[in-house]
Amino acid sequence: MKYAIVEISGRQFWIEQGKYYDLNRIPTELGKEITLNRVLLLNNNNEVLIGKPYLETVKVKGKILEHLRGQKKIVYKMRPKKKTRKKQGHRQELTRVLIKDITIN
């Protein structure tokens, strides 16, 4: 089983080949190929490579499938005994990326 741990927009994802992931919005057009090069760890059939902090030889190729918005989250702030209440909704802008392959140079 081949997987990698990749840092994308300040968050870390466990990435496998052939699956898709919802990441923070990547401002590119649909169908475009992207390369993720901040690979922290790679497991290639129980041969584990760990970067310091990144692996320069490993590249992860992906394809942008769609841009979407996440589920609505409710942010509610209230100060007791002050009659102040603030209710606010938030929907995160997301990009769905299909992981094509994980290559080692």
Image (cartoon, helix red, strand yellow):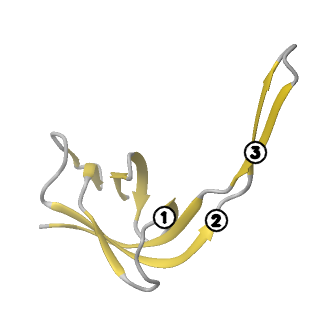
Which residue position holds label 2? 69
Residue at left 88%, top 23%? Answer: 83
As measured in the structure, the alpha-carbon distance from the residue carrying label 3 to the one carrying label 2 is 16 Å
In this rendering, the count of numbered labels is 3
* Residue type at tag 1: Arg
Asked whether disc 3 touches disc 1, contact meaning CB atoms under 8 Å apart, the reply is no
Q: Locate residue 36: give its quadrant.
A: bottom left
Residue furthest bottom as drawn: 31
**Label 3: element kind:** strand
x and y percentages locating residue 87 in the rendered image: 80, 40
As measured in the structure, the alpha-carbon distance from the residue carrying label 3 to the one carrying label 1 is 21 Å
Report the quarter where the N terminus lies.
Answer: bottom left
Give me the disc on residue 88: 3
| Residue 63 vertical position relative to residue 53 in the rendered view, above or below | below
**Label 1: element kind:** loop
Which residue position holds label 1? 25
Residue at left 80%, top 25%? Answer: 78
**Mark nearer the N terminus (3 vs 2):** 2
Q: Residues within 10 Å of mark 1 (few under 14, many from 20)?
A: some
x and y percentages locating residue 9 in the rendered image: 38, 52
Q: Locate residue 27: give its quadrant.
A: bottom left
- Of tags 3 and 2, the one toward the viewer is 3
Task: Give whichever of 100, 95 is nearer the camera.
Answer: 95
x and y percentages locating residue 46 in the rendered image: 29, 49
- Of tags 3 and 1, the one toward the viewer is 3
Q: Residues within 10 Å of mark 3 (few under 14, many from 20)?
A: few
In the image, is 57 to the left or to the right of 24? left
